[in-house]
Image (cartoon, rainbow, N blue to C red):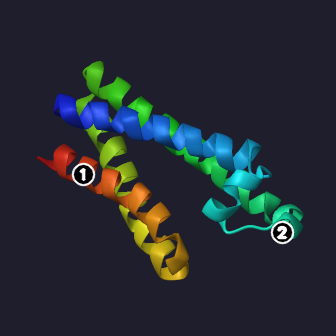
Amino acid sequence: MSTAAQVLAIAIAVMLTVVFVMEAILYRNPRLYPMFLTRPGDLDAVRMWTVNMGWYNLTTAAALVAGVVLVQTDHLPQGEALIVFTAAQHVFLAVVLVISQPKLWLNSLMEGVPAAILLVLALN
């Protein structure tokens, strides 16, 4: 697996960790309302969604880091499989996001484009 693919996997893992913090910890911050399409009266209702998705993103970040560690420690097929699956998963989820909530098209691009690039790099 190329160095570029591994670096991008780590960069996406960092991005997903930042998203974890925003979703699971800072979701009540008014500056994030537009990103999540929330309003002050919605916060208790969306808590389960935001916190759950935050932890989901953190574990996905961990999967990418684990994949890179596996690649670096001579477990190439396992590491590549983990990275390719995670990238493909995020491409698919980006499509689901934009179909289910078109207003979040930018979020969808931020999720899907880096993952698609990673997928292409990892499969070449």
Residue designated by label 2: 42
Q: Which mark is residue 7?
A: none
Query: Residue 44 lies in what quarter of the image?
Result: bottom right
Where residue 91 sits in the image (x, y, percent)?
Answer: 36, 62
Where is residue 9 shown, x and y percent of the image?
A: 34, 37
- The CA distance from mark 1 to mark 2 is 35 Å
Closer to us: mark 1 or mark 2? 2
Q: Amino acid at mark 2?
A: Asp
Q: Is residue 34 left or right of residue 17?
A: right
Disc 2 crowd rating (10 Å Cα; few below 14, some 14-19, many 20+) is few
Residue 119 spot, x, y in % from top left: 25, 52
> Residue 15: x percent and y percent?
48, 41
Mark 2 or mark 1, which is nearer the start of the sequence? 2
Q: Which residue is most to the left?
A: 124
Q: Are marks 1 and 2 in contact (CB under 8 Å)?
A: no
Q: Specify the farthest residue to the front.
A: 31
Looking at the rendered structure, which numbered label has been put on residue 117? 1
Q: In the depicted view, which residue is nearer to us: 115 or 122? A: 115
Q: Is residue 29 left or right of residue 100?
A: right
Q: Quadrant of residue 122?
A: top left
Which residue is painted at 54% across and 76% down in the image? 103
